[in-house]
Image (cartoon, rainbow, N blue to C red):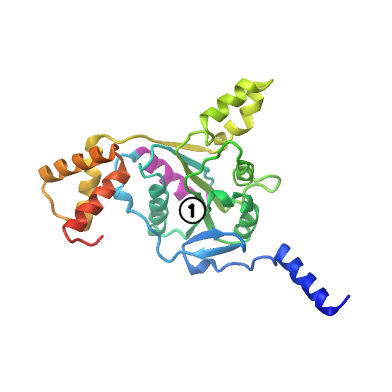
Amino acid sequence: MSDAALTRIAKALERMSPAPMAAPDFAAADAFVWHVEPDRLVPVPKVNRVDLPLLVGIDRARDTLLANTLQFARGLPANNALLWGSRGMGKSSLVKAIHAEALAQGHALKIVELQREDLPSVGRLLTLLRDSGDRFVLFCDDLSFSHDDQHYKSLKAVLDGGIEGRPDNVVFYATSNRRHLMPRDMIENERSSAISPSEATEEKVSLSDRFGLWLGFHPCSQDEYLAMIRGYCDAHGVEIDDETLRAEAIEWQATRGARSGRVAWQYFTDLAGRRGAAI
């Protein structure tokens, strides 16, 4: 066989089995995003987040998650957490704000965002994090699984850790609109068609049970909605009287057909633009 042919074969094998990823520089940032093909951790110099005091109406979830995160940051035992419930009520914002609060209190805590579709690579990511002296919040936003989705099996590597166990320096936080992560009709269909209904769905339904903390997020009241907007106005120096704010904000929510923290921020963004304020 010619040298050229051997070279082509060698390059093809390298593409099929790429060289192991070099140890990342975790000192480069406090936040990273995990990408695959090729595997790499990309530093995030500035995280898009809201200050913790501006998150209104989720006091219990805030206090519980903050306490759990600070325990973990101090090197103490902590639980994986599932933040589930209504859309736009600050689930992902809370995770990022809690991370910022831990940093503000002097803890050297890193956060790594993992996309749901990259869950099959989580074993490789955990190996990188396990070998580091830092502590990490592994964060997956909008986690859910469709009828034919097998990615949920990879999630068990994070929650249970297999034979090696979850690294002591990693805790996993996920947000989802679903409490059980699976579509309700999928669970009910498998129960109705299986010879042993309970066994057919136990593996999928019990996935949520592997999270030590379940934090529920529910629709906000009108008073909470208005308080969110007033908090944004005060924090960013946007002046508006209470009567005008109330009338405009209620009209805005009516046009959206919803009331949530996300709708409150969208109204405030419009208001700030009209008032010529930078946010």
How far across and down, in percent of the image, does residue 194 sit? 66, 23
Name the residue furthest right.
1
The amino acid beneath tag 1 is Ala
How far across and down, in percent of the image, does residue 181 sit? 52, 36
The one nearer the camera, 182 or 23, is 182
Q: Residue at x 31, y 44 (%)?
A: 261
Would you place residue 48 above or below residue 210 in this image?
below
Q: Residue at x 56, y 30 (%)?
A: 186
The one nearer the camera, 103 or 260, is 260
The one nearer the camera, 265 or 158, is 265
Q: Residue at x 20, y 56 (%)?
A: 272
Q: Which picture quadrant has residue 153?
A: top right
Near mark 1 (Cα within 10 A), the count class, few <14, some 14-19 or many ≥20, is: many
- The quadrant of the image that shows the C terminus is bottom left
Magenta-colored segment: predominant secondary structure: helix
The kind of secondary structure element at disc 1 is helix
Does residue 17 appear in this view?
A: no
Q: Which picture quadrant has residue 149?
A: top right
Taking the image as shown, residue 142 lies to the left or right of residue 90, namely: right
Would you place residue 269 above or below residue 24 in this image?
above
Return the residue at label 1: 73
- The quadrant of the image that shows the N terminus is bottom right
152 drawn magenta: no
How far across and down, in percent of the image, does residue 223 sit? 22, 37
Range of residues picked out in magenta: 60-76
How far across and down, in percent of the image, does residue 73 sit? 48, 53
Would you place residue 14 above or below residue 72 in this image?
below
73 drawn magenta: yes
Taking the image as shown, residue 88 lies to the left or right of residue 193, namely: left
